[in-house]
Amino acid sequence: MLELYQTEWCPASRRVRERLTELGLDYLIHQVSVEREARTTLLAATGVDTIPALLLEDGVAVVGEEAIGAYLDERFDEPAEAEAHRLKAAKARRRYLEEECKCLQPATH
């Protein structure tokens, strides 16, 4: 099984998660510490302290959003429902920005 080392606050990690979902791939998520020096599990598993990192079934690590995207594009065909996942994610982001994000709401004085 694929293993993704990531954090919820990392935009690149989010995009990798979305791509894995679009492709219909199962994967295990490992949350990584904010502090690089505390990322001992990540370092032991992948040899790096950088996220996102995708650990393949053969133990090889693919590190960084671009490298992971290239790996996935090279090895997996996009299923028909991938576009539906992208549209749903875009709708959820728009809804969040319109309804919940304080950054777009009018300031009160």
Image (cartoon, rainbow, N blue to C red):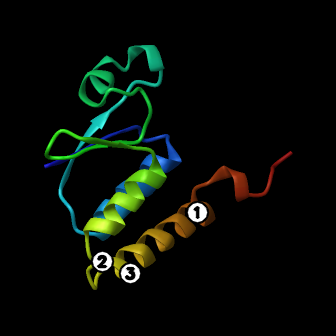
On the image, numbered disc 1 is attached to which residue? Answer: 99
Q: Residue at x 14, y 44 (%)?
A: 58
Is there any visible trace of residue 18 in the rendered image? no
Q: Closer to the N terminus: mark 1 or mark 3?
A: 3
On the image, numbered disc 3 is attached to which residue? Answer: 83
Q: Position of residue 40 (x, y in %)?
A: 32, 17
Disc 1/disc 3 C-alpha distance (Å): 24 Å
Q: Position of residue 89 (x, y in %)?
A: 44, 69
The three-letter amino acid code for the residue at tag 2 is Glu
Instruction: Give the vertical position of 51 relative to 45 (above or below).
Output: below
In the image, taking residue 105 as reference, residue 65 lies left or right, namely left
Instruction: Give the vertical position of 75 relative to 39 (above or below).
Output: below
Q: Closer to the N terminus: mark 2 or mark 1?
A: 2
Residue 60: quarter of image? top left
Disc 3/disc 2 C-alpha distance (Å): 9 Å
Dot 3 alpha-carbon crowd within 10 angstroms: few under 14, some 14 to 19, many 20 or more:
few
Q: Closer to the N terminus: mark 3 or mark 2?
A: 2
Dot 1 alpha-carbon crowd within 10 angstroms: few under 14, some 14 to 19, many 20 or more:
few
> Between residues 98 and 20, which one lies in front from this camera angle?
20
> Between residues 67 and 90, which one lies in front from this camera angle?
67
